[in-house]
Amino acid sequence: MAARDHEMSADDVVRFLDVVEGFGVDAVKFTGGEPMLRDDLEEIVRRTPDSMEVSLTTNGTFLPERADGLVDAGLDRVNVSQDALDEEAFREVTQSGAYDRVIEGVKAAVETGLDPVKLNMVLFEETTDYVPEMVDYVAENDGLQLQLIEFMPELVGKPEWAVDIDAVHDWLAERADRIEHREMHDRKRYWIDGGMVEIVDPVGNEEFCANCHRVRVTHEGYLKGCLNRNDDLRSMGEMTRGEIATTFRETVRERVPYYGEYMVEDGDGGWEVNQKYVDA
């Protein structure tokens, strides 16, 4: 499995999944970029160990033609990126003319029995006004859930785009019939008029990081212990299954919470890299 400038092969992906199944890993999510650019995605899903729940995050444009095949292959659920309901607003936010394809993709996902179909909406200054209509939309449409994802300046810059995530929590809490906490990331779920809205709010959130148990694999074949870091990458190279297992074990053992350990408060309301990782 050479760490290279192109993607892992289907065999590479399946070999890795076979190895980590032995550690009790029971779920895999294929993300991107756009994972549906791969023509062999159905093959990979089909060959994923039966013990694993298989999910996918996609922009939705390929779902109209491929949702049936992915479900037949074993896909359990899907997240579709949709930042607005209105076509013009969608175009402005995404700089894309793919609105109709995304709507068709969401419909196809629901009709093929994927459950739940989550709509991923990134919260930043340009999208917050669209939250109320998105909340109403998932309440009115069976099979849909809404996942509000806090904008992460540490990944893409533009800190001025960030919004007050606590204000969004408060707005939802005022309208919720029920509020739940998930163990993963200590996320909150709000049930409003029968619809479910979940917030993913990692920025500066020590509880979120302390309850994160994910390991990522890049498309080139690197293990990554934290989404926000690139200084902890481990290449699987041309490894044997035993070597992959050792590298996976090391990645899990050495991962630390991003906020509260790798990043610490600087005394001025901000965050800075913990000095012990600077010197490492």
Image (spheres, rainbow, N blue to C red):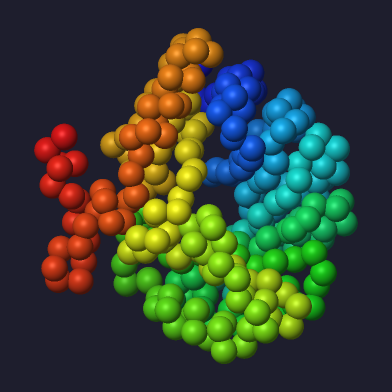
The image quadrant of residue 121 is bottom right
Above-or-below relation of 69 to 3? below
Residue 185 as seen in the image, left or right of residue 132? left
Residue 94 visible in the displayed image: no
Work out whether residue 155 can be spotted. yes
User: Residue 40: x and y, percent?
Assistant: 70, 28
Task: Please give the name of the residue rendered at 55% of the width and 28% of the height, measured from the top-left corner.
Answer: 23
Residue at the spot x=49%, y=80% of the render? 168
Q: Which quadrant of the view contains residue 141?
A: bottom right
Look at 79% across and 78% down and name the residue there: 140
75 or 276, which lies in front?
A: 276
In the image, residue 211 lies at what x, y percent? 45, 54
Q: Is residue 197 above or below residue 258?
A: below
Residue toward you, 134 or 85: 134
Seen at 68% across and 71% down, the residue is: 196
Q: Is residue 235 left or right of residue 69?
A: left
Residue 161 rendering spot, x and y as whole percentages: 37, 71
Where residue 24 appears, as percent x and y from the top left, is 59, 32
Image height of 70 relative to 208, above or below: above
| Quarter of the C terminus within the rendering | top left
* Circle count: 0
Q: Quadrant of residue 178?
A: bottom right
**In front: 114, or 80?**
114
Q: Image height check: is 215 above or below 129?
A: above
